[in-house]
Image (cartoon, coloured by chain):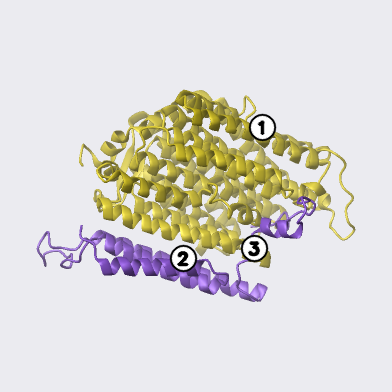
Chain colours: A purple, B yellow
Amino acid sequence: MTINLTLIVLLAVVYSTGFYLLMQRSLMRIVLGVVLLGHGANLFLQAAGGPPGEPPKAGGSVLGALSDPLPQAMALTAIVITFAVTTFLLALAYRSHALLGHDEVSDDVEDQRIRQHPEAEQESQAVVSDEPGEHV
Amino acid sequence: MSVLVAVPVLLPLLAAGLALVLSQVGQAQRVIAVAVLAAVMVDAAVLLAVVDDTGALVLRLGGYGPPFGITLVADRLSALLLLVSSVITLAVLAYSISQRVTDYGRAPSSTSFHPIYLVMCAGVALAYLTADLFNLFVSFEIMLAASYVLITRGTTAKRVQANMTYVIVSLTSSLLFITLIALVYAATGTVNFAELEGRVADIAPGAQLGLALLALVVFGIKSAIVPLHFWLPDSYPTAPAPVTAVFAGLLTKVGIYAVIRTQTVVFTHADTWNLLLFVALVTMIIGVLGALAQVDINRLLSFLLVSHIGFMLFGLALFSPLGLTGVILYILHHITVQTALFLIAGLITRHTATVSIRDMGGVAGQRPWLAVVFAVPALSLAGIPPLSGFIAKITLLQGGVEADSVTAYAVAFGAIATSLLTLYAMARIWVMAFWGEPPERAPDKPDAVETAGSARPMLLVCASLVAFGLVIAAAAGPLSEVAGRAAVNLLDGGVYRSAVLGGDVR
């Protein structure tokens, strides 16, 4: 299979920017990172299908010169899924903003505990997960 | 006959739609959900009997074969996991319904819980049954999208904060999953497991290893393998007890199933994989040590969950029939016991009105039956004979000894140490929560013993789950024979290939 160098360089840029944004504190930037990574992944699926050929429709074109339709179908599905999950993430960011006044990802619970108790006394304060006996 | 394969996916999805339409009629919603999950359970039992008798059942959707069509396959492993999972989902549903009915009466409905729960069940079933990598991605997304909603429902600030990590981490692993699919497709030109098996062997060994490692990372995030486990103890305990229980019991195990399926059918390993063995050891030790440092009962159980993922990796890393038999038995045991423990922890916190085991005490005196129901799965998790945990662990250890290498012995030793430390963690809960004097209650806290007076239906659900664990132990003979046959099938990809492709197509 031939490799399109432009596409590969583009993919590397999109992936690294996406992962960089994913490691930020603000949920808004994380959403942007997810969007970028999603695009990168879908582009990668396209690249995996090999070089473009004729449109894959019945009767219209020569067998053997067609592009591979399978990665396109997979990319379509993946686009729908990443789109839906991005929407959910946006809703979560909005709710976080409404409830907490900011949209920052909080520290690890264990990290918070260790910071509170620099000495070995890590057990003295219980980290309590949530109200017990709650309903679904 | 092959229509049986589609039922566990189709029925819950259709029922989810119906339950959404009937969201104002609580009673109807509950009847639909229970009936459908019970039907799935029966279907899974029939499927197991048929598959064990005649070999894998294959369903080609729309009559299209691989690589273009969607293929569902039920082999022995899928059918076994499907059966146990459907028992668990039914039990958790019964628990959540009885919790709601106990507290609010029969009339009120919980508009979104039942539909989303059913969608999650469909996703789990599809993950077990699918025969290609891309469909596995879709099923993971169905399952995870439902889980995002379940875990962030009833939004308190704390829950939103804790579960952002869960959503972002899962999403990252999903994006890596798409990348894996693209790489695999670029290398082999197919995503069907059966076709992959032959073609992966033809590509360069370095590329093979790279793909296998990426697959391990993708599914390792979902199944909380150390060092990819950090999100689990922070997010799972924040959900209500039934949700935590079903997540802990099922979702991580689906991840482990995906690891097993990809590493045996797609990427073949002829011998023990030392890297995976090392990861297994680290997972066991770090998980159990994390558990010992906890005072929140749910966090403690979450760390133990991480620790016991290591046992399943141990058996897989050996790549021997005995090791894989042990893994399958361990998954069946662990799904049941871990779910039961989280449900019982829900009852304990309901009774004591706290999640910190330091503030508990004297539960055994006040609720002797709760103590009995807790003790059995706790001992089973630690691997005390004759419970199901013992049978699974002894098979794994036999597999380790059979491998007869220094690394395998070292990990087997680590597994024994982890079991003892698990017993210690359980003893800690027992001593602090069940023995001693009940603590003085602060005047502003409600008297939990009064409010939780009628937890009997929930206790009954927990008890039947514990009884199911005992059934697994009692049926260990035939069960380990089926698991053994499933393990042989996994290691010999030819059976799977000829079932899916129908003949020796390459």
In the picture, measured across the screen, residue B176 lies left or right of residue B292, that is left
In the picture, measured across the screen, residue B343 lies left or right of residue B23, that is right
Q: Which chain carries label 1?
A: B
Q: What element carries label 2?
A: helix
Q: Tell me the distance, in whole angstroms, between the alpha carbons under discs 3 and 2.
A: 19 Å
Q: Where is residue B14 in the image (x, y as percent from the top left)?
A: 44, 56
Q: Earlier in the sequence, mark 3 or mark 2?
A: 2
In the picture, measured across the screen, residue B134 lies left or right of residue B357, that is left
The residue where tag 1 is placed is: B420
Residue at the image position 9 percent from the left and 63 percent from the top: A62
User: Could you confirm whether marks 3 and 2 are on the same chain?
Assistant: yes
Residue at the image position 21 percent from the left and 37 percent from the top: B503
- Which quadrant holds the C terminus of chain B? top left
Residue at the image position 64 percent from the left and 41 percent from the top: B288
Q: Which amino acid does label 2 sit on?
A: Phe
Q: Mark 3 lies on which chain?
A: A
The residue where tag 3 is placed is: A107
Q: Tell me the distance, in whole angstroms, between the alpha carbons under discs 1 and 3.
A: 32 Å
Q: What residue type is labelled 1?
A: Leu
Q: Where is residue B165 in the image (x, y as percent from the top left)?
A: 57, 61
**Label 3 with label 2: CB-CB less than 8 Å:** no
Instruction: Determine the residue located farthest toward the left in the rendered image.
Output: A62
User: Could you confirm whether marks 1 and 3 are on the same chain?
Assistant: no
- State whether residue A80 is above or below residue B333: below
Q: Mark 2 lies on which chain?
A: A
Question: From the viewer's perspective, is the residue at label 2 or at label 1 nearer?
Answer: 2
Q: Is mark 1 on a helix, strand or loop?
A: helix
Confirm whether residue B25 shows in the render: no
The residue where tag 2 is placed is: A19
Q: Tell me the distance, in whole angstroms, between the alpha carbons under discs 2 and 1.
A: 40 Å
Q: Position of residue B246 (x, y in %)?
A: 57, 48
